[in-house]
């Protein structure tokens, strides 16, 4: 949360507060977050908290979709503008259903003025990486594509638009367990290859421990970060790690901390 290295900053929230009644009450108050840019590695940050505590709002701040009532949100030490806005993957399918998979993934490059040949070539590289080769000419809609496939489209679109930062708001929450596990592996593969800074919201504690190298927990009324857990698991992981004693101990520790936050103990 606080700077203790010489690494450059990539995301920073300074004294951020949110009020919807002119400052009479706050749903988020004096919240700080500092994420440093780790070259050739990236970071995987997971935010946990009870429903309604403001986790999604934090992501919307970073994405430039919402401005806090007070405080500053910075990307690379600069205020968010249309030039440095960050894409976001939602739980709800967010692809444009009247466009093909290829056009959806290439959309961010189109807005940047990149010519059609180059943007389609780069989009196809991501489409192949996320396992959608052969589907690029299909419309990005259900049931033409499954829920997992539509989330793959959203991830590829976000990665190509801003490969440095990936914001994900419970992206696997609506998926069946098998698809959810597959998507966890896909996300880790992309993280290892591109080294983005991932900020990921979930309610699943086991998923949080499996994916994250840092977990931040929020309390409610008014919300702020109150707990930080460093997940001291190997950088590269596979499902076998979930069967190890240390993994299960971490899950129990995070669960106990979350219960303490919720109950006030």
Image (spheres, rainbow, N blue to C red):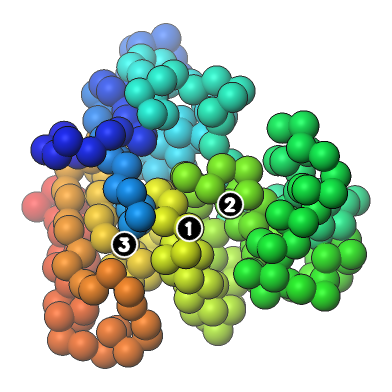
The numbered mark at residue 97 is none
Q: Quadrant of residue 156?
A: bottom right
Q: CA distance from mark 3 to mark 1?
A: 16 Å
Front-most of 117 and 145? 117
**Helix, strand or loop at mark 2:** helix
Question: In the rendered view, would you say 71 is above or below 227?
Answer: above
Residue 101, percent across and down? 81, 59
Of the image marks 2 and 3, the number of the one nearer the N terminus = 2
**Helix, strand or loop at mark 1:** helix
Point out the image quarter for the N terminus.
top left
Left or right: 18, with 148 as reference point: left
**Helix, strand or loop at mark 3:** loop
Read off the residue under disc 1.
194
Question: In the rendered view, would you say 145 is above or below 243?
Answer: above
Left or right: 191, with 248 as reference point: right
Q: Nearer the viewer, mark 1 or mark 2?
A: 1
Left or right: 215, with 78 as reference point: left
Q: Residues within 10 Å of mark 2 (few under 14, many from 20)?
A: many
Read off the residue under disc 3.
212
Q: Is residue 118 visible?
A: yes
Residue 178, percent across and down? 55, 84
Residue 161, percent across and down? 63, 43
Question: In the rendered view, would you say 68 is above or below 37?
Answer: above
Read off the residue under disc 2.
159
Q: CA distance from mark 1 to mark 2?
A: 9 Å
Residue 203, percent across and down? 39, 61
Of the image marks 3 and 1, the number of the one nearer the N terminus = 1
For the residues bearing labels 1 and 2, Cβ distance under 8 angstroms: yes
Q: Residue furthest top?
A: 22
Query: Which residue does the image show at 17% across and 58% down from the upper left?
Result: 230
């Amino acid at each position: 949360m606080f700077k203790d290295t010489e690494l450059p900053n990539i995301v920073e929230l300074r004294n951020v507060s949110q009020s919807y009644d002119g400052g009479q009450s706050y749903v988020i108050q004096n919240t700080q977050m500092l994420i440093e840019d780790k070259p050739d590695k990236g970071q995987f940050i997971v935010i946990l908290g009870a429903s309604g505590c403001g986790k999604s709002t934090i992501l919307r701040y970073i994405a430039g979709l919402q401005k806090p009532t007070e405080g500053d949100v910075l990307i690379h030490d600069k205020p968010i503008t249309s030039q440095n806005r960050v894409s976001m993957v939602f739980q709800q399918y967010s692809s444009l259903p009247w466009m093909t998979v290829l056009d959806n993934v290439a959309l961010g490059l189109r807005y940047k003025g990149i010519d059609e040949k180059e943007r389609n070539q780069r989009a196809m590289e991501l489409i192949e990486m996320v396992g959608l080769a052969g589907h690029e000419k299909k419309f990005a809609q259900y049931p033409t594509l499954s829920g997992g496939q539509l989330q793959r489209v959203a991830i590829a679109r976000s990665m190509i638009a801003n490969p440095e930062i990936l914001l994900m708001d419970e992206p696997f929450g609506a998926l069946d367990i098998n698809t959810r596990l597959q998507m966890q592996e896909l996300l880790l593969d992309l993280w290892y290859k591109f080294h983005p800074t991932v900020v990921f919201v979930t309610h699943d504690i086991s998923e949080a421990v499996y994916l994250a190298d840092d977990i931040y927990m929020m309390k409610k009324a008014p919300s702020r970060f109150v707990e930080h857990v460093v997940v001291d698991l190997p950088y590269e992981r596979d499902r076998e790690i979930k069967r190890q004693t240390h993994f299960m101990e971490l899950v129990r520790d995070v669960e106990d901390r979350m219960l303490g936050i919720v109950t006030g103990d």
